[in-house]
C-alpha cells in the first residue's frame, strides 16, 4: 500500500495505530517485495506471518501461490484481512502470537516465517518461535535495528551477548539490511533492520548440553566487565589450566569468547561421551525365529548387518495433558540417526526379557522409573527393522535426565499433532516408531 492508501484505509475501518501493540504500517511496496524475496518462497512452502497489519507483505506472499497463516492480535485488523483476502489461500488467526502453539506447524510439509515483530515483545517472540527444536525452516524478521545487531553479532563487539549465543547455538543469523523509519506509518522513533534466520544442520556443531550451555552463558554475561574465570568459578575450579588448554586468555571476558569456545567450556564441565563403535559391536542380542522363539545369540554387528530377527522395546511416555514425549535420536545411532522416535526404545539384550529391558531403557535414556503398561506387540518385519517390538505406556510429569550423545533432544506433543506431522513429514521419523504409533492409536481408539 502507498502512504495515502494506508491513511485512507485506516480511516475507513476506523483504526488508529496502537503504540502499545507496536503498530507501524509499511508503505514502501518495492521494499515489501524485496523483503518477501528474501524468504525464497516456492509452492511447497507454508508461510506464517506475525503481525500482518494491513497486509502489505501478506498480499505479496499470496501472489507466490502459497498458503499463509497470518497471526494478528488486533480484532479490527483481523476482520479487515479476512474480508480483503477472502478468496485467497489465507487463514487469519486472531490471537496473541505468544499464545500460539508452534508445535502445530510440524503438520505442514515446510514452514517459513515472515514477521514484522512488535518491538516491545520481539525478543520473547523470537525465543518462542526459534526455540530448539523448531519446525520453521527459514525466518525473515523485521526487528528494531539494535536487536538485529545483537542477534547477528560477532565476538568482541558491543552487541555480542547472551541472547546472541542463545540464538546462534542452533541458528545462523544474517543481517540483511537496515530499514529506515521513514517507510512506516506512523514513523517509529528508531530504525529497523531485516535479518534471515535458518536452523543449523543438526551435525554442524559438536553435541553439548543446551541447558548447561545457557546457564554458563548467563553467568558469563552477568557482569560484562568481570573476567570470565571468576564468574565461572562455581563450575570450573582450575581456570588457568582449562583456559590454556582451550587457547583462551586467562583474563578473557565473556564478550570475547566465540560460540565454539562456549561449547568447549560446556563440554569441559559436562563432557558428552561419544559411544565407542567397538563397545556397541560387543553387545549381544537374542536371535529369534518367525514366531519370536529363541534360536541363538549374536553380536549387534551381525544382527544388524544380516538383518536377523531380534527383540526390542518401545516406551511411550505421556504427561498430565495426554501429550506424548518424543525423542530425537542421537547423531551416532547406527540406525535412523537424528530422526524422531518413541520416548525411549532399545534392544533386548541376551539373557533379558521384554519387561526387564523396558525398565532398563527408561532409566538409561530418560533417567526415570515409572509403572509401565504393555499395550501391544509387533511382529518382526522390514518396517520394524526385523525387530519383534513390545510397546509400553507410562506417565511422567517431572524432569528427565538424558545423555546428549544418545538423544539430541526431547519434547512433548499432542497426539493429533503427531498424526499430522507423520502425514506431512514421514521421513522425520524412525520407521519402527511409525509402526508403534499406528498400533497405539488403534489401541487408544478401541479403548
Image: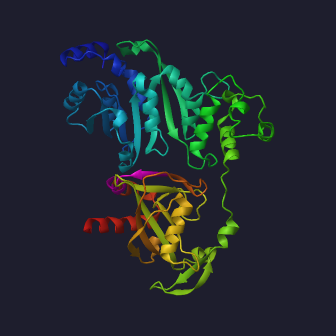
Q: Is residue 128 above or below residue 226?
A: below
Which stretch did the figure color magenta? 410-419
The location of residue 156, given as percent across then percent down, is 68, 25
Residue 316 shows up from this direction:
yes
Residue 62 shows up from this direction:
no
Quarter containing the C terminus: bottom left
In-front residue for pair 242/400: 400
Task: Tell me which corner region of the image, top left, top right, bottom left or bottom right, holds residue 396.
Answer: bottom left
Q: Residue at x 70, y 25 (%)?
A: 226
Q: Residue at x 30, y 65 (%)?
A: 444
Q: Is residue 399 above or below residue 252?
A: below
Magenta stretch: includes residue 33: no
Q: Is residue 426 above or below residue 67?
A: below
The location of residue 137, given as percent across then percent down, is 46, 43
On the picture, is 334 further left or further right than 80?
right
Task: Tell me which corner region of the image, top left, top right, bottom left or bottom right, holds residue 161.
Answer: top right
The location of residue 51, given as percent across then percent down, is 34, 28
Q: Is residue 336 above or below residue 166?
A: below
Amino acid at each position: 500500500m502507498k502512504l495515502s492508501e494506508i491513511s485512507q484505509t485506516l480511516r475507513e475501518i476506523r483504526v488508529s495505530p496502537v503504540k502499545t501493540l507496536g503498530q507501524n504500517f509499511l508503505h514502501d511496496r518495492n521494499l515489501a517485495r524485496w523483503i518477501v524475496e528474501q524468504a525464497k518462497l516456492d509452492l511447497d512452502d507454508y508461510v506464517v506471518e506475525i503481525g500482518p497489519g494491513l497486509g502489505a507483505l501478506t498480499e505479496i506472499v499470496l501472489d507466490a501461490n502459497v498458503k499463509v497463516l497470518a497471526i494478528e492480535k488486533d480484532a479490527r485488523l483481523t476482520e479487515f484481512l479476512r474480508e480483503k483476502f477472502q478468496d485467497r489461500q489465507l487463514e487469519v488467526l486472531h490471537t496473541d502470537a505468544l499464545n500460539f502453539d508452534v508445535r502445530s506447524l510440524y503438520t505442514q510439509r515446510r514452514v517459513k516465517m515472515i514477521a514484522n515483530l512488535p518491538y516491545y515483545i520481539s525478543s520473547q517472540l523470537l525465543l518462542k518461535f526459534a526455540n530448539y527444536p523448531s519446525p520453521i525452516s527459514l525466518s525473515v524478521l523485521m526487528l528494531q535495528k539494535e536487536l538485529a545487531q545483537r542477534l547477528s553479532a560477532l565476538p568482541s563487539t558491543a552487541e555480542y551477548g547472551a541472547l546472541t549465543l542463545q540464538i546462534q547455538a542452533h541458528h545462523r543469523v544474517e543481517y540483511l539490511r537496515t530499514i529506515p523509519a521513514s517507510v512506516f506509518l506512523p514513523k517509529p522513533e528508531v530504525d529497523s533492520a531485516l535479518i534471515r534466520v535458518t536452523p543449523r544442520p543438526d551435525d554442524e556443531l559438536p553435541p553439548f548440553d543446551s541447558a548447561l550451555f545457557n546457564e554458563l552463558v548467563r553467568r558469563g554475561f552477568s557482569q560484562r566487565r568481570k573476567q570470565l574465570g571468576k564468574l565461572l568459578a562455581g563450575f570450573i575450579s582450575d581456570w588457568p589450566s582449562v583456559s590454556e588448554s582451550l587457547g583462551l586468555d586467562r583474563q578473557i571476558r565473556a564478550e570475547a569468547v566465540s560460540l565454539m569456545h562456549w561449547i568447549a567450556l560446556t563440554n569441559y564441565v559436562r563432557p558428552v561421551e561419544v559411544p565407542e563403535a567397538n563397545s556397541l559391536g560387543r553387545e549381544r542380542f537374542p536371535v529369534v525365529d518367525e514366531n519370536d522363539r529363541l534360536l541363538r545369540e549374536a553380536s549387534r554387528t551381525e544382527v544388524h548387518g544380516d538383518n536377523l530377527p531380534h527383540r526390542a522395546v518401545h516406551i511411550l511416555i505421556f504427561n498430565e495433558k495426554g501429550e506424548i514425549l518424543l525423542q530425537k535420536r542421537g547423531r551416532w545411532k547406527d540406525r535412523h540417526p537424528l530422526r524422531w522416535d518413541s520416548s525411549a526404545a532399545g534392544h533386548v539384550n541376551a539373557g533379558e526379557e521384554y519387561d526387564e529391558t523396558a525398565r532398563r531403557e527408561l532409566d538409561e535414556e530418560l533417567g526415570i522409573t515409572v509403572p509401565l503398561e504393555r499395550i501391544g506387540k509387533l511382529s518382526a518385519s522390514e518396517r520394524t527393522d526385523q525387530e519383534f517390538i513390545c510397546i509400553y505406556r507410562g506417565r511422567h510429569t517431572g524432569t528427565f535426565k538424558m545423555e546428549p550423545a544418545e538423544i539430541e533432544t526431547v519434547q512433548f506433543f499432542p497426539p493429533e499433532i503427531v498424526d499430522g506431522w507423520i502425514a506431512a513429514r514421514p521421513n522425520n521419523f524412525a520407521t519402527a516408531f511409525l509402526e508403534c504409533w499406528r498400533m497405539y492409536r488403534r489401541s487408544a481408539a478401541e479403548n
